[in-house]
């Protein structure tokens, strides 16, 4: 009697209706980002983080930029549950994200714990390649448009450093927990340069709609064009023009807006740009954040990002006039 051969899961029937979904870019703010527990690894990492006292180091040493990394905290991950996701706050891209100082590595860690893991522009590889080769981080060179030569080199080198961490894991069926962590490592350099690059792209493009500045120069217009092209290359991954989706018995689609953090930030930015929303800097001298009156629910001619800043600026003017 012949033994029954093991059935390949890929040969199992799909228990849902399969349809194509046609869409343009639905630039809404309702984009969710996975927020798994994040920690750090690499020799000397704890010099930058101390749960029980002040940090011994506040800025990352050059020799640690490529060897230290952000990773998932496996002790806090439930393998039977999907990772929790967060919907980015309205205006996140020009408020919380622009206010982040990625050079403060502890601030960058806490930011990722709250809003999701930061990665650079990595290449997506086709199915059919070996799993290990497909997951190996490599820079998506077609995306890098050279907004800033220093950030460009830094992000490429950062992703290559993550690849080196990945390659250091033995190629065998069973690996220890430390090896699993390194397979998903994001080097400090990759994360820092990805944020710096995205922040510059946001500043360059929103300059077009800043109504509190003089007319744009040709240099500023050129930077805005380059940056908008850079941003637009991220969006198809989140909003493909043609998408194959599964429809369950209740008519619900498998289409999801879950995204990595940088792509979600650019999708929010695209919404503001395509709606031609006015941008300005809050005139409260103690604030100075970039904001859009429409997104903040403020009058279009307002000079302040919120009523609190408006009242604070009023008090500062009163104090100054009575000195």
Image (cartoon, rainbow, N blue to C red):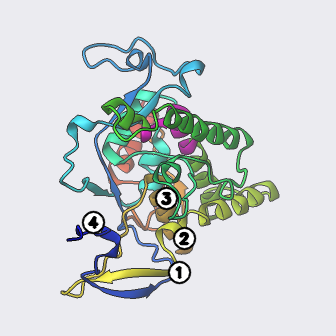
**Alpha carbons under labels 4 and 2: distance apart:** 38 Å
**CB atoms of marks 4 and 3 within 8 Å:** no
The tag on residue 263 is 3
| Camera-nearest label, 4 or 2 | 4
Question: Disc 1 designates what residue?
Answer: 241
The tag on residue 6 is 4
Q: Which residues are magenta?
A: 183-195
**Alpha carbons under labels 4 and 1: distance apart:** 37 Å
Specify whether residue 272 is in view.
no
Mark 2 falls on what kind of element? helix
**Alpha carbons under labels 3 and 2: distance apart:** 10 Å
- Asked if residue 223 is among those painted magenta in the image, a careful observer would answer no
| Camera-nearest label, 3 or 1 | 1
* Mark 1 Cα-neighbour bin, 10 Å: few <14, some 14–19, many ≥20: few
Q: Which is more N-terminal, label 2 or label 4? A: 4
Give the x, y percent position of residue 247.
Answer: 29, 84
> Could you say which is closer to the camera, residue 162 or residue 153?
162
**CB atoms of marks 4 and 2 within 8 Å:** no
| Most distant residue in the front direction | 1
In this rendering, is residue 199 above or below 150?
below
Please tell me whether the stretch drawn in magenta is mainly helix, strand or loop: helix
- Asked if residue 184 is among those painted magenta in the image, a careful observer would answer yes
Mark 1 falls on what kind of element? loop
Question: Disc 2 designates what residue?
Answer: 236
Q: Which is more N-terminal, label 1 or label 3? A: 1
Give the x, y percent position of residue 225.
Answer: 72, 63
Residue lying at 58% horizontally and 34% vertically, measured from the top left: 161
| Camera-nearest label, 4 or 1 | 4
């Amino acid at each position: 009697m012949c033994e029954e051969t093991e059935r390949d899961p890929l040969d199992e029937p799909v228990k849902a209706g399969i349809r194509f979904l046609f869409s343009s870019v639905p630039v809404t703010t309702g984009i969710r980002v996975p927020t798994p527990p994040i920690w750090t690894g690499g020799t000397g990492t704890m010099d930058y983080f101390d749960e029980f006292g002040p940090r011994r180091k506040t800025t990352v040493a050059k020799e640690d930029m490529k060897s230290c990394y952000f990773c998932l905290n496996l002790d806090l991950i439930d393998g039977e549950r999907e990772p929790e996701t967060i919907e980015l706050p309205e205006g996140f891209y020009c408020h919380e994200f622009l206010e982040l100082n990625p050079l403060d590595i502890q601030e960058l860690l806490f930011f990722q714990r709250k809003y999701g893991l930061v990665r650079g522009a990595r290449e997506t590889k086709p199915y059919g390649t070996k799993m290990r080769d497909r997951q190996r981080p490599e820079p998506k060179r077609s995306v890098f448009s050279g907004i800033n030569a220093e950030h460009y080199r830094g992000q490429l080198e950062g992703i290559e450093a993550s690849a080196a961490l990945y390659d250091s894991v033995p190629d065998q069926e069973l690996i220890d927990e430390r090896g699993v962590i390194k397979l998903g490592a994001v080097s400090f350099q990759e994360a820092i340069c990805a944020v710096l690059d995205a922040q510059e792209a946001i500043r360059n493009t929103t300059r077009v709609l800043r109504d509190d500045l003089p007319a744009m120069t040709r240099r500023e217009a050129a930077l805005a064009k380059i940056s908008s092209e850079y941003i637009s290359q991220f969006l198809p991954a989140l909003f493909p023009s043609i998408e194959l989706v599964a429809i369950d018995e209740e008519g619900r689609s498998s289409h999801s807006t879950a995204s990595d953090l940088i792509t979600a930030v650019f999708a929010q930015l695209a919404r503001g740009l395509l709606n031609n929303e006015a941008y300005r800097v809050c005139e409260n001298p103690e604030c100075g954040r970039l904001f859009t009156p429409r997104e903040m629910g403020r009058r279009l001619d307002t000079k302040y990002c919120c009523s609190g800043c408006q009242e604070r600026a009023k008090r500062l003017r009163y104090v100054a006039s009575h000195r």
